[in-house]
Image (spheres, helix red, strand yellow):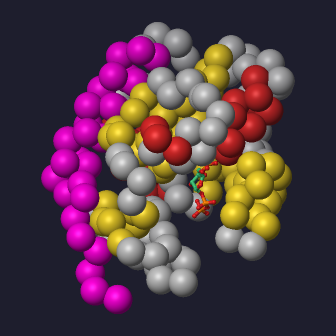
């Protein structure tokens, strides 16, 4: 497979992550520790960069989910496969995603985390495929809106390939 075509460059990502980190730092100033919940695996690079640019106290957690699939088609049902390690009760929580596609994953996570008595739950995603939305979710901090292309890099994969590309690339999936 040839190199993915650049959709969002490394420099564009860096600038946008700086802006998001500045906004989040402002919004949560004087609110105590912010719990960042990264959704594995795709968010790991975005979370690493975003969290290091915040100027507020923060605590890092990870969560992992799995989507039920029928063949290559996702059913929309989501299952928790790894939970956070600390209670989020009374805490301000920011869920960090690499991409919101249909919205099912984030919708499930918001509901689940809100049921645990946090002070607040907000969401941050680097990418949003808004035309693929099946369930509406609140996105509080958004990096970029993209089209329907298959994207890789900066944490996102195609069949576990290209996760560590430094930019967001678009590919033609091979069956
Ligand atoms: C991706 C992404 C989100 C989810 C979004 O994860 O990281 O968690 O899909 O899709 P949705 O809005 O349609 O629910 P993926 O299942 O590819 O797993 P990965 O992060 O481990 O690569």
User: Taking 32 as reference, is 84 left or right?
Assistant: right
Image label count: 0
Residue 37 seen in this snapshot? no
Residue reaching furthest bottom? 1
Residue 124, position as x, y percentages in the image: 48, 34
Residue 173 versus residue 107: which sits nearer the camera? 173
Is residue 2 shown in magenta?
yes
Name the residue at 30% across, 65% down.
169
**Ligand 1 shows up in which quadrant of the image?**
bottom right
Report which quarter residue 133 is drawn in: top right
Q: Quadrant of the C terminus?
A: bottom right
User: Taking 169 as reference, is 47 left or right?
Assistant: right
Name the residue at 67% across, 45% down.
105
Q: Which portion, as a residue range, is magenta?
A: 1-28
User: Taking 159 as reference, is 125 left or right?
Assistant: left
Residue 100, position as x, y percentages in the image: 53, 44
The secondary structure that most of the magenta stretch takes on is helix
Residue 162 versus residue 117: which sits nearer the camera? 162
Residue 40, position as x, y percentages in the image: 61, 57
Name the residue at 48% across, 70% down.
157
Residue reaching furthest top? 30
Residue 104 seen in this snapshot? yes
Residue reaching furthest left? 11
Q: Is the residue 174 above or below the residue 151 in the image?
A: below
Is residue 47 shown in magenta?
no
Q: Is the residue 57 above or below the residue 155 in the image?
A: above
Name the residue at 49% across, 73% down.
158
User: Taking 73 as reference, is 22 left or right?
Assistant: left
Residue 126, position as x, y percentages in the image: 41, 44
Residue 106 versus residue 95: which sits nearer the camera? 106
Q: Quadrant of the N terminus?
A: bottom left
């Amino acid at each position: 497979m040839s190199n993915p075509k650049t959709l969002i460059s490394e420099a564009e990502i860096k600038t946008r992550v700086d802006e998001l980190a500045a906004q989040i730092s402002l919004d949560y100033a004087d609110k105590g520790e912010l719990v960042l919940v990264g959704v594995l695996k795709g968010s790991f690079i975005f979370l690493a960069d975003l969290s290091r640019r915040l100027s507020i106290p923060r605590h890092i957690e990870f969560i992992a989910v799995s989507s039920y699939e029928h063949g290559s088609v996702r059913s929309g049902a989501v299952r928790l496969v790894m939970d956070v390690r600390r209670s989020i009760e009374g805490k301000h929580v920011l869920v960090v995603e690499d991409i919101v596609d249909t919205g099912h994953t984030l919708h499930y996570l918001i509901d689940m985390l809100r049921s645990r008595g946090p002070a607040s739950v907000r969401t941050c995603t680097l990418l949003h495929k808004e035309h693929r939305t099946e369930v509406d979710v609140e996105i509080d901090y958004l990096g970029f809106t993209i089209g329907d292309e298959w994207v890789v890099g900066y944490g996102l994969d195609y069949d576990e390939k290209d996760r560590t590309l430094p930019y967001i690339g678009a590919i033609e999936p091979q069956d």
